[in-house]
Amino acid sequence: MSFRYLFITLIALLFLPVFCIGAEADTKVDDPISPYITLPISAYILDGQESSLSSTRTNEQLIEVFQKANEIWSQAGIGFEVKYIGRIVLPPKILKDLVNGNHKPFLTGMNSDFQTPNLSQFNAFYASSIGLVNGVAVRDDMFFVTDFPSVRHERVTAHEIGHLLGLGHAHRDTARLMYSGTNGTILTKEEIKTARNNAKLRLNTTYHQD
C-alpha cells in the first residue's frame, strides 16, 4: 500500500463520522404531538326577521370551515368536533346591535330573549357582520365571526379558537396564527404548549350551560 493511498484512507475515516452525523440530523423527523386532543364545539348561524341582516352561511360551509381550521390546529395535536350546527333567529335590536359591533345585548339576552340550544365547551357564532373586525372572542367559551372577513374563513375561526385556548395576539411575525388580520397559520412551540395545557384542562371539565 502506497503512502498516498494510506493518507487518503485515513482522511476519509476521520471525516466519515461527521458526514454520518450530518445525514442523520437532516433526515430526522420530529415525532408527532400526542396524544391528540379532541374538543367539542357548537356552531350557530345568526338570522334576523329582516333577511338583510341574516347570515348567508350554510351548514355545509361551516363544516368545511372547521375541517380546514382543524388542519391548522393539527400542528398542536388539537382538533374540534362539531357537535351541533343550527340557526338562531335573534330579536331585531339584538341582531342590529351585534351587526354594528355591540355584542353585549347578545350576551345578556342568551336563553332569555332567545335560546341557544346545545352549547358546548366552545361555541362559534356566525353573523352577517360584527362591526369592523373579522372575529372576536367574548368569553372563554365563545366567539363571533363575520360572514365577510378580510382573510380566509377558516383562519378567522382558528385564530379565535386560539384566544379561547389562552393565546394572546402576536405582534411581530405576520406568518403566525395569532397575528391579527393576516392569513398566517404558524403556532410557536410556546403557543402549542399553552394551548395544549388549556385544552387538557377543558377536556377534563364538565361544561354546564348558564
Image: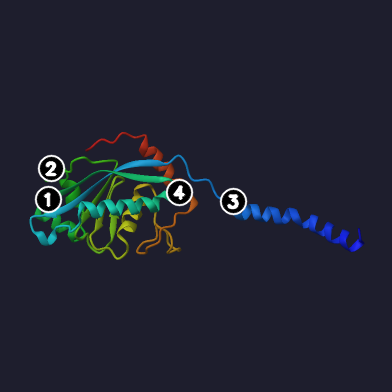
Residue 117, located in which quarter of the rendered image?
top left
Distance from Cα at disc 3 to Cα at disc 4: 21 Å
Distance from Cα at disc 1 to Cα at disc 3: 53 Å
Residue 149, located in which quarter of the rendered image?
bottom left
Q: Is residue 112 above or below residue 135?
A: above
Number of numbered callouts drawn? 4
N-term-proximal mark, 1 vs 4: 1
Residue denoted by label 4: 192
Q: Is residue 12 above or below residue 30?
A: below
Residue denoted by label 1: 89
Residue 112: numbered disc: 2
Residue 137 seen by the camera: no
Please name the residue shown 39% across and 53% down the image: 72
Distance from Cα at disc 2 to Cα at disc 3: 56 Å
Q: Residues within 10 Å of mark 2 (few under 14, many from 20)?
A: few
Distance from Cα at disc 1 to Cα at disc 2: 13 Å
Q: What residue occupies the far front of the structure in this picture?
A: 1
Please name the residue shown 42% across and 46% down the image: 195
Viewed as shown, does residue 158 lie left or right of 76?
A: left
Q: Nearer the viewer, mark 1 or mark 3?
A: 3
N-term-proximal mark, 1 vs 3: 3
N-term-proximal mark, 2 vs 3: 3
Residue denoted by label 3: 28
Distance from Cα at disc 1 to Cα at disc 4: 37 Å
Distance from Cα at disc 4 to Cα at disc 2: 37 Å
> Which SS class for mark 3?
loop
Please name the residue shown 34% across and 48% down the image: 164
Residue 109's x, y, as percent?
15, 46
The answer to whether marks 4 and 2 mark residues whose Cβ atoms lie closer than 8 Å is: no
Question: The disc labelled 1 sits on which kind of residue?
Answer: Val
